[in-house]
Image (cartoon, rainbow, N blue to C red):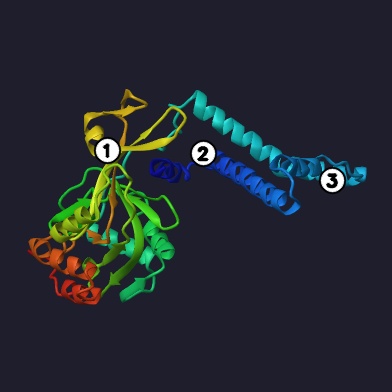
Amino acid sequence: MKKLILIIKVNWKDPVWSKVIATGIIATFSFFFTSLYSLILSIIDSISFKDAFQTITDFFDKEVSVNIGVIAVLVILYITLTLNPFISFIVSLFNKITSPKREKKEKSTELARATEYSTSFFNQRMASAFPGIRDIAWFDNPIIALDRLEILLKEPLMFKLGSKQFESDPIWWFRGGSALNIEKFKRIGRKKGLMNIAQLKIKRIAAYRGDSYYKDFVYVELEGEKQTGLYNYSKQDIERQIEFFGYSWEEYGLIRNKIGWTTPIRREEYEDGATIKGGKVREALKAELRVRYLSKYNFIIAAKGSPYNSRRFERESKLYLNAILKDEIEPNEFFDILKTYNKNEQ
């Protein structure tokens, strides 16, 4: 049951399958409530369930007199509101079934040339995403916070012919000794984004724009999500992860079947390039890797050439970030430390 719910959640974002799922849910609930009403009616009127159900169906079989003009208006309205969307839905579903490997033509993959320092590039993105802000500004509404991140991390994020001065990967995320360039970012829900392979359920963010442009950063804090059910970590397993690392997470792959339905698979199966479905081995070479955080998690986003890309940040930040997650300190205490960083921090 958990796996069915997970598969529905994953595929609910698909424009075709969301309609199929919605139709199934409506039909199921309609049958359920009709049966429930029939049961209540049979008890109240002391008749059999079959007779009560027949009473309902007979009601919908009754003939009524309707003016032909009203029928014409209703028919036109029905055609206008449902026919075109229905045709589009059928075409989309047919294309998914008959041409599962058909992909939309992608825009040119030719990367633009890197022409500026990462700190300057990031400062311009910060101005676009957080106009008018000086010092620290909090965004506690996750929907608004995600709106701002979409602007900050819009395409392009990668460039060609990078150099020490003009980096090809100008925007990075940092946390303790972990850091990586951000190649792509997209919204996958009202409160969720996908950054590289990491699924982010946004809780809140804080943007810092100070007097020194190279110190700009965005603090990101996430909420923990439910497990996929692939590993069934116990509460103790998660607590041990949090105690050792400061947070808990799971890694898994996503495969897509012939009609576009996505299913999660274990990380081991992702690495092997194959999985077992319906008792048969199925190739999973095209699976997409995902990371999901099962507890609160936090990090900062900044320019590659910022002072946070330093050994000092590696030494100091993990303790502060973990302490924030444990509610041992306020984030502003960590921000005050970051403000003391020099341009060429070691």
Q: Which residue is mark 1?
A: 266
Q: CA distance from mark 1 to mark 2?
A: 23 Å
How far across and how far down the image is residue 269, in percent?
25, 33
Residue drawn at (33%, 46%), measured in percent from left and top? 228
- Asked if the residues shown at circle 3 and circle 2 are in contact, with their CB atoms under 8 angstroms apart, the answer is no
**Residue type (three-letter) at the residue carrying disc 2:** Trp
How far across and how far down the image is residue 135, in percent?
29, 76
Quick check: 336 above or below 239?
Answer: below
Please identify, in this view, whether the residue under mark 1 or under mark 2 is nearer the observer: 1
Q: Residues within 10 Å of mark 3 (few under 14, many from 20)?
A: few
Of mark 1 and mark 3, the one earlier in the sequence is 3
Residue drawn at (42%, 44%), measured in percent from left and top? 10
Q: Which mark is residue 17?
A: 2
Q: Which residue is mark 3?
A: 73
Q: Quadrant of residue 76?
A: top right
How far across and how far down the image is residue 190, in percent?
45, 56
Residue 292 vs residue 72: left or right? left
Q: Quadrant of residue 326?
A: bottom left
Q: Quadrant of the N terminus?
A: top left
SS at badge 3: helix
Residue 99 vs residue 200: left or right? right
SS at badge 1: strand
Q: CA distance from mark 3 to mark 2?
A: 31 Å
Q: Quadrant of the C terminus?
A: bottom left
Q: CA distance from mark 1 to mark 3?
A: 55 Å
SS at badge 2: helix
Residue drawn at (52%, 42%), measured in percent from left and top? 18
**Residue type (three-letter) at the residue carrying disc 1:** Arg
Residue 247 seen in the current view: yes
Of mark 1 and mark 2, the one earlier in the sequence is 2
Of mark 3 and mark 2, the one earlier in the sequence is 2
